[in-house]
Image (spheres, coloured by chain):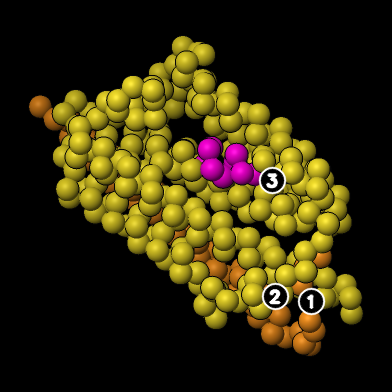
Chain colours: A orange, B yellow
Amino acid sequence: MIPDNGGFATAAYIAAAVIYVGYALSVRARMRRLLARRREMPEQSGGPR
Amino acid sequence: MSSTLSRDTTVNAPTLSNGTDWLIIAGLASVAAVYVRAFLFTPPEATQGPAQRILYVHAPSAFVALYLAFALMALTSALYLWLKDEKLDRVAESAAEVGLAYTSVVLVTGPLWGKPIWGAWWTWDARLTLTLFLWFIIVGYLVLRGAIDERGMRARYSAVLALLAGFLIPFIHLSVYLFRTMHPMPIVLKPSAPSMPGVMLVTFTSAFFAFTLLFAGLLRARYRMATLRDSLADRENDR
């Protein structure tokens, strides 16, 4: 008989989704903050050293 | 060595105006497709039951974290110490942070598989313990980066730490052969044929591609963020 442990799999998949989506959103939020900061700066050419 | 990349081509072009990256969206969509396939189109394993499905998230995440993210971090850190190119430092930083997210998934999903299969959430087994140590070292690496303002010193110190962390990768890989361990042996990435039925193997292989695609998207976005951050810091220093 197949054991009834589907709850563990569901919990693992939800936890993984929370971590991956949460991390993707954190990168997006930090990027948006930097883009907003750049818009506030006076125009200047050049990139990172 | 210095990079003179235009901020418009490095940061804006493939990124939407609100900071969203299409490659991340493609990666997340692929992972969602793997979820659907794992739950709706892949039968549960007879002895382990539905908890075996955790393998389709756990193993690809571990593969990406160890053999892509942290290997890339160690390699680019070594190259940074040689070439002193800030782009390499930014790749190492980005790979470390994305790898930390993947390792966190490994460390969360592993115990959720261990409890129903082993009867214990955690065991101080060589592979589990070394992976946890690596997670702490990467947290330390990111804390170190945040604590040093001077960019050259930050890059040099963190490159040395990343290189040392990289030495754990072969030990983690070989831990199931070198030590008496409860962790399962490889079932696909091994010299002989995969010990898995075809329908499960398709799901497992798809998961590897999906999580690798997501890694590429996250790494690219994180690298762009680091590039823009350094670019803004340069502009602020020039004023």
Q: Amino acid at mark 2?
A: Arg
Q: Is residue B180 left or right of residue A37?
A: left
- In the displayed structure image, the side of residue B82 where residue B128 appears, left or right: left
**Residue located beneath label 1 in the image:** A46
- Check the residue under mark 3 and report the chain it is in: B
Q: Mark number for residue B76?
A: 3
Q: Callout 1: residue from which chain?
A: A
**Pointer 1: residues within 10 angstroms few (<14), some, or many (20+)?**
some
x, y (%) of residue B170? Answer: 58, 26
C-alpha distance separating marks 2 and 3: 22 Å
Is B229 placed above or below B174 here?
A: below
Disc 2 on helix, strand or loop? Answer: helix
Residue type of the residue flagged with mark 1: Gly
Question: In the image, is residue A42 above or below residue B144?
Answer: below
Q: Is residue B125 above or below residue B136?
A: above
Q: Secondary structure at mark 3?
A: helix
Q: CA distance from mark 2 to mark 1?
A: 7 Å
Which SS does the magenta portion mostly show?
Answer: helix
B222 over B77 or under it: above or below: below
* Residue extending farthest left: A1
The magenta-colored residue range is B65-73
Mark 2 Cα-neighbour bin, 10 Å: few <14, some 14–19, many ≥20: some
Q: Please give the label number shown on residue B7.
A: 2
Q: Are marks 2 and 1 in contact (CB under 8 Å)?
A: yes
